[in-house]
Amino acid sequence: MKKIVILISGRGSNMEALIAAARRGDLANAEIAAVLSNRPGARGLETAAAAGIVTAVIDHEAYPDRAAFDAALAAAVDAHAPDLVVLAGFMRILTATFVNRFAGRLLNIHPSLLPAFPGVNTHARALAAGVRLHGCTVHFVTPALDHGPIIIQAAVPVLDGDDEAVLAERVLAQEHAIYPLAVRWCVEGRLAIEGQQVRLAGSTQANGFLRSPQSS
Ligand code: GRF
């Protein structure tokens, strides 16, 4: 059985989508070993605990600097000997030391079609830029923020009259679809990183979705 550790900071809806996928048997032979949060009040902690998953808080405010926090976080992650570490709404920038320790087994989901709109406030920035397509990206994490090799993306249209909340909701529905798929491919050992590109073994399927609002 492969082991997954999920890192969250808040609501935890992507984490919930992964828990549901695991329950359905959609994460191949993988189990979610633990959910860790850097925020004591993260709502997702309750959801994980209710699902019978081990939870822990590593409060970043309890550490003098980023390096000390990351060392404590790495130790907490390592305690579960995970095959895969999944960032699901984890809102702390990780040091290169942390990222390199888990290189090749550290995934993130970002609410934009990278490389467009790295960083925060992606939906507001997409609306301000007037793009007609927006979406989400699952990628391997590298020390450069939101720049790692892309595993899968889903695109949604930006419609006249959209506000930030409506657009965020349309994108989030796609996040919940593509993250479990990417995690499954990863635990199945089907992903190979070649430079900035990710190859999916055993499939001719393109690693991208285009969704109309009706299908989301
Ligand atoms: C998601 O939009 C994710 O892409 C971003 O933060 C949000 C977290 O939502 N990194 P949730 O905690 O998974 O509900």
Image (tube, helix red, strand yellow):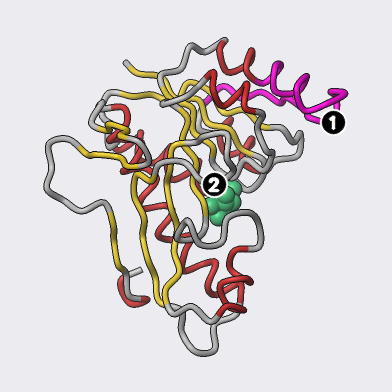
Magenta stretch: residue 159 in it? Answer: no
Whether residue 83 sits left or right of residue 147 in the image: it is left
Mark 1 crowdedness (10 Å alpha carbons): few <14, some 14-19, many ≥20: few
The yes-or-no answer for disc 1 within 8 Å of ligand 1 is: no
Taking depth in this image into account, of 95 and 34 the one nearest to the observer is 95
Magenta stretch: residue 54 in it? Answer: yes
Residue corresponding to mark 2 = 146
Going by the numbered disc 2, the residue's amino acid type is Asp
Whether residue 22 sits left or right of residue 25 in the image: it is right
Image coords of residue 71 (percent x, y): 70, 16
Taking depth in this image into account, of 154 and 48 the one nearest to the observer is 154
Q: Residue at x 30, y 38 (%)?
A: 24
Image coords of residue 35 (percent x, y): 57, 28
Q: SS at mark 1?
A: helix
Whether residue 3 sits left or right of residue 56 in the image: it is left
Where, by quadrant of the figure, is residue 97 drawn? Answer: top right
Q: How many marks?
A: 2
Image quadrant occupied by the N terminus: top left
Going by the numbered disc 1, the residue's amino acid type is Glu
The first of marks 1 and 2 along the sequence is 1
For the record, the magenta segment spans 53-73
Residue 61 image label: 1
Taking depth in this image into account, of 177 and 156 the one nearest to the observer is 156
Q: Residue at x 30, y 34 (%)?
A: 194
Marks 1 and 2 sit apart, C-alpha to C-alpha, by 24 Å
Q: Residue at x 67, y 38 (%)?
A: 93
